[in-house]
Image (tube, rainbow, N blue to C red):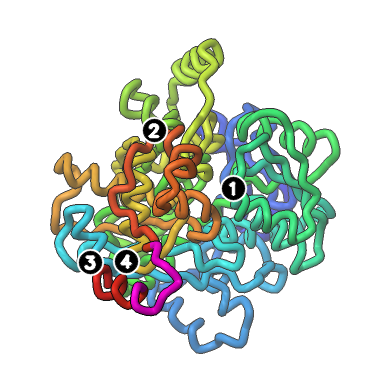
């Protein structure tokens, strides 16, 4: 290990115990150079100043004029100290909301006061990605990067473009698949000045190419295969605990796409447990869309497990080989989780082991119905976010989650990330409904709030208000 890693008490480590190769924090790797496995950021906690209790972090609320204390990522710097605090990049990320929602609890089948929604749509770019981008940008700054790239279904590209635009530290290069990005997200990348490269193919194709380009041109990659991204995403769970007055919930339910969030959450709770800062670890539920259900099929149907790092790589290879032979492509209205080959699969399996996790799949119909219920409760979210609520409802119906357990569902992105899906669900225009949702297997708008059409006449308007209002 290099002198930099030793002096900083932080380093990068291969997640596979049989390899466990280590690298300095000032190195940039897409994967472990020794075995090709995923890397994580690790710490020599015995050599670092640590809080005696999680409540110690509350003192940062007294220093709101300090950008790093204001940041919902860097006020927890003691638990992700891979860079000096003064080097940490922030644009005000992490000012998010944990909202108790009794109407959604009733829909899901839980008792009042049992369900909370963690609304990451309040981040500067409108999604949870800003948590990880703050950390990845900090590492990119440490290593002197001048260009940063990502493959994206939309949210990562918006976040990367925003951080590049605000900080002026580097140039953003974004790879998207053809027809695989919501306009609300594409608009952000274009507006913020990113170089956007659209290739023929889907997210998995874009992900493959961006890794090749990053290696060839020495461009810094910010997708969640980057271990520093996940360090920032750990803080979503720290803010959840903070909002619950440091009570650990019984369940965390999160949408599963590239599996960065679920991986980061598992790492957060593993570290907090090992440091003695929490007494229990919540259970983790990862929710796939039926049209992008790789994790569900591997975990629940094929029995693939982390098994302490002794993973069955052959089972995964066979699965992907069959996927290629059959020409299976991800397809779901929840574009943010429309991913067939999640890059953080192994880390997610590790998180599921740490958190005694489960995986479920939900249909686009279930996702949109849950989304409408979330919206009716006052927190508009993009379709992928609502997979967490749809998944919680399914787990309650199965008896896996009991009615009086404390459940936190993660809403990953803002409603305006994909307004087309929302309008199509509530529209009176059957053609629009069919074109946007019908082709995804959505047959009804169970909770539609349709506009009322009336003549441009005062009496007719008053009649309509009396009738419908």
Q: Which residue in the structure is indicated by mark 1?
A: 182
Of labels 1 and 2, earlier in sequence is: 1
Residue on which disc 2 sits: 441
Q: CA distance from mark 2 to mark 3?
A: 29 Å
36 or 205: nearer the eye?
205
Q: Would you name the residue on which mark 4 appears?
A: 377
Q: Is residue 67 left or right of residue 401?
A: right
Callout 3–callout 4 Cβ contact below 8 Å: no
Q: Indicate yes or no whether the magenta region holds residue 340.
A: no
Q: Secondary structure at mark 1?
A: loop
Could you say which quadrant of the image residue 250 lies in? bottom left
Mark whose residue sits in front, 1 or 2: 2
Horizontal arrangement in the rendering, residue 269 relative to residue 135 (left or right): left
Question: Cα distance, mark 1 to mark 2?
Answer: 19 Å
Is residue 348 shown above or below 240?
above
- At mark 2, the secondary structure is loop
Badge 3 or badge 1: first in the primary sequence: 3
Residue at the spot 55% in from the left edge and 51% down from the top edge: 230
Secondary structure category for the residue under label 4: loop
How far across and how far down the image is residue 129, in percent?
Answer: 57, 56
Q: Residue at x 17, y 43 (%)?
A: 397
Q: Which secondary structure class fits the magenta region best? A: loop
Q: Is residue 70 above or below residue 294?
A: below
- Where is residue 36 drawn, in percent x and y? 63, 28
Mark in the foreground, 3 or 4: 4
Q: Position of residue 238 (x, y in %)?
A: 43, 65
The front one of 452 and 340 is 452
Could you tell me which residue is drawn at 46 percent across and 32 percent down?
439
Nearer to us: label 3 or label 1 = 1
């Amino acid at each position: 290990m290099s002198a930099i890693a030793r002096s900083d008490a932080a380093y990068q480590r291969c997640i596979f115990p049989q390899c466990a190769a280590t690298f300095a924090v000032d190195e940039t790797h897409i994967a472990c150079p020794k075995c090709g496995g995923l890397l994580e950021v690790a710490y020599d906690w015995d050599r670092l100043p640590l809080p005696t209790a999680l409540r110690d972090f509350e003192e940062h609320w007294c220093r709101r004029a300090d950008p790093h204390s204001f940041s919902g990522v860097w006020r927890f710097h003691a638990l992700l100290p891979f860079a000096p605090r003064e080097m940490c990049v922030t644009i005000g990320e992490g000012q998010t909301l944990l909202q108790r929602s009794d109407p959604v609890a009733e829909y899901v089948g839980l008792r009042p006061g049992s369900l909370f929604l963690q609304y990451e749509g309040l981040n500067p770019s409108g999604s949870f990605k800003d948590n990880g981008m703050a950390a990845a940008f900090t590492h990119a700054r440490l290593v002197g990067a001048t260009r940063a790239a990502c493959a994206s279904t939309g949210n990562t590209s918006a976040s990367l473009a925003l951080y590049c635009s605000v900080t002026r530290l580097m140039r953003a290069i974004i790879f998207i698949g053809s027809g695989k990005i919501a306009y609300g997200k594409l608009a952000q990348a274009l507006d913020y000045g990113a170089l956007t490269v659209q290739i023929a193919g889907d997210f998995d194709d874009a992900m493959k190419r961006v890794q090749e380009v990053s290696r060839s041109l020495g461009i810094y990659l910010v997708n969640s295969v980057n271990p520093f991204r996940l360090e920032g995403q750990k803080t979503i769970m720290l803010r959840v605990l903070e909002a619950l007055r440091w009570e650990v919930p019984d369940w965390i339910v999160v949408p599963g796409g590239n599996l960065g969030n679920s991986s980061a959450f598992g790492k957060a709770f593993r570290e907090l447990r090992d440091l003695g800062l929490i007494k229990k670890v919540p259970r983790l539920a990862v929710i796939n869309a039926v049209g992008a259900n790789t994790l569900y099929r591997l975990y629940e149907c094929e029995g693939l497990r982390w098994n302490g790092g002794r993973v069955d790589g052959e089972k995964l290879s066979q699965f992907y080989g069959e996927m290629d032979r059959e020409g299976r492509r991800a397809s779901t209205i929840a574009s943010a989780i429309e991913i067939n080959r999640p890059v953080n699969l192994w880390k997610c399996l590790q998180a599921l082991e740490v958190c005694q996790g489960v995986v479920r799949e939900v249909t686009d119909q279930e996702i949109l119905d849950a989304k409408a219920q979330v919206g009716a409760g006052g927190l508009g979210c993009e379709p992928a976010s609502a997979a967490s609520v749809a998944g919680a409802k399914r787990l309650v119906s199965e008896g896996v989650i009991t009615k009086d357990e404390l459940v936190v569902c993660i809403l990953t992105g803002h409603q305006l990330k994909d307004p087309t899906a929302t309008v199509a669900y509530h529209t009176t225009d059957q053609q629009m409904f069919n074109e946007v949702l019908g082709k995804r297997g959505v047959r009804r708008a169970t909770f539609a709030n349709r506009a009322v059409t009336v003549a441009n006449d005062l009496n007719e308007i008053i009649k309509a208000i009396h009738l419908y209002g």
